[in-house]
Image (cartoon, rainbow, N blue to C red):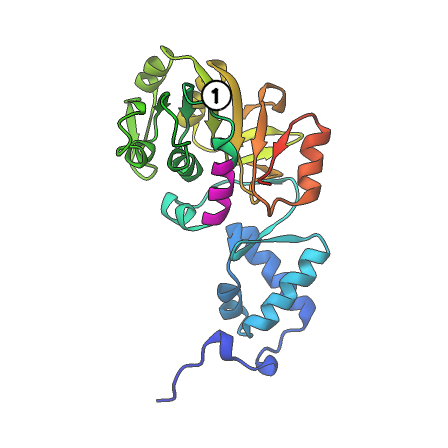
């Protein structure tokens, strides 16, 4: 039986598709799953990685997609109906989450009360809290608690409630009741998307209800949004941009998306 040939090893002439056809297929894939890695696209199209990379560069130059760390995503103010699972999100854009977390760390004073929302970027913020931080962290994110379990100097409060198993988080009326007892200096909020026109949006109604209390009870609220979430619109509205103190994103943020948010009056903070 002949040995299988990987997509990376395929010669340029292996695909009968014209460049325009390949690029249309790439856009179709991204329209259905939001993010795709070059190796996955190469296998789908049966072409080499080099061919896919050239197609991605061409599509990015046309403004039709963005290349992010190890993957590609569509551009524009787009509506999403679902998000990848937690484990997949935890693996994606690790460097971007670290960049965002370092920006967040610079916004926290040593004795602040901090709300940390659900999501993998909030977990990264917990890991990057300054060494001198001695304040209070209030969260409904079990993974945040695990990230801070070796820091006894941090006053850590986990909000109980109905457990969302796939996100390892709590929400619902019990969570809101417990959260309502606290006021915070700063809140770091997750999101499904942030748009100059549609504001902060996400997917899960129970998590959004908790997030809205965090917004109401925090002096400043910042959205944690990697470059793939700028300009995105998820299925449920959380709030308009006027109630937010800013958006924290990573170096790969598309300049046009950053400019659009800033022109609408929302500061976008990027790593230096």
Number of labelled discs?
1
**Above/below status of 73 relative to 118:** below
Quadrant containing the N terminus is bottom left
**Residue at the spot x=55%, y=57% of the render?**
29
Residue 113's x, y, as percent? Answer: 41, 18
Left/right of residue 166 with respect to residue 122 in the rendered view: left
Residue extending farthest top? 181
- Majority SS type along the magenta span: helix
**Residue at the spot x=53%, y=54% of the render?**
69
Q: Is residue 99 magenta?
A: yes
Residue 183's x, y, as percent? Answer: 42, 12
Left/right of residue 176 with respect to residue 242 in the rendered view: left
Residue 130's x, y, as percent? Answer: 42, 31
**Residue at the spot x=53%, y=69% of the render?**
42
Left/right of residue 137 with respect to residue 39 in the rendered view: left
Q: Is residue 196 magenta?
A: no
Q: Nearer the viewer, residue 264 or 252?
A: 252
Left/right of residue 263 with respect to residue 206 in the rendered view: right
**Residue at the spot x=60%, y=41% of the render?**
272
Specify few, some or many for label 1: CA neighbours under 10 Å numbering under 14, 14-19, or 20 or more. many
Q: Quadrant of residue 210?
A: top left
**Above/below status of 187 relative to 148:** above
For disc 1, the marked residue is 186
The residue segment tinted magenta is 93-102
**Above/below status of 133 relative to 180:** below
Residue 265's x, y, as percent? Answer: 69, 25
Is residue 237 at all visible to an observer of this figure?
no
Is residue 111 at all visible to an observer of this figure?
yes
Q: Nearer the viewer, residue 195 or 46?
A: 195
Q: Secondary structure at mark 1?
A: strand
Residue extending farthest front? 132
């Amino acid at each position: 039986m002949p040995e299988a040939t990987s997509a990376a090893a395929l010669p340029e002439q292996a695909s009968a598709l014209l460049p325009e056809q390949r690029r249309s297929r790439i856009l179709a894939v991204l329209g259905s799953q939001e993010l795709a890695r070059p190796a996955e696209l190469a296998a789908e199209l049966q072409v080499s990685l080099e061919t896919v990379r050239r197609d991605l560069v061409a599509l990015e130059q046309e403004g039709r997609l963005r290349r992010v760390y190890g993957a590609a995503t569509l551009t524009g103010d787009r509506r999403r109906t679902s998000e990848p699972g937690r484990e997949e999100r935890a693996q994606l854009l690790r460097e971007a989450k670290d960049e965002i977390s370092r920006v967040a760390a610079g916004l926290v004073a040593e004795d602040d009360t901090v709300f940390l929302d659900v999501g993998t970027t909030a977990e990264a913020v917990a890991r990057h809290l300054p060494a001198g931080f001695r304040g209070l962290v209030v969260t409904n994110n079990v993974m945040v608690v695990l990230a801070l379990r070796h820091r006894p100097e941090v006053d850590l409060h986990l909000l109980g409630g109905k457990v969302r198993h796939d996100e390892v988080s709590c929400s619902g009326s019990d969570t809101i009741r417990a959260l309502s007892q606290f006021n915070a200096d700063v809140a770091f909020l997750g999101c499904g998307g942030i748009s100059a026109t549609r504001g902060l949006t996400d997917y899960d109604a129970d998590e959004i209800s908790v997030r809205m209390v965090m917004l109401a009870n925090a002096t400043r609220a910042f959205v944690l949004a990697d470059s793939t979430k700028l300009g995105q619109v998820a299925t449920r509205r959380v709030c308009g941009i006027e109630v937010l103190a800013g958006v924290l994103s990573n170096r790969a943020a598309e300049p046009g998306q950053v400019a659009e948010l800033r022109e609408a009056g929302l500061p976008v903070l990027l790593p230096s």
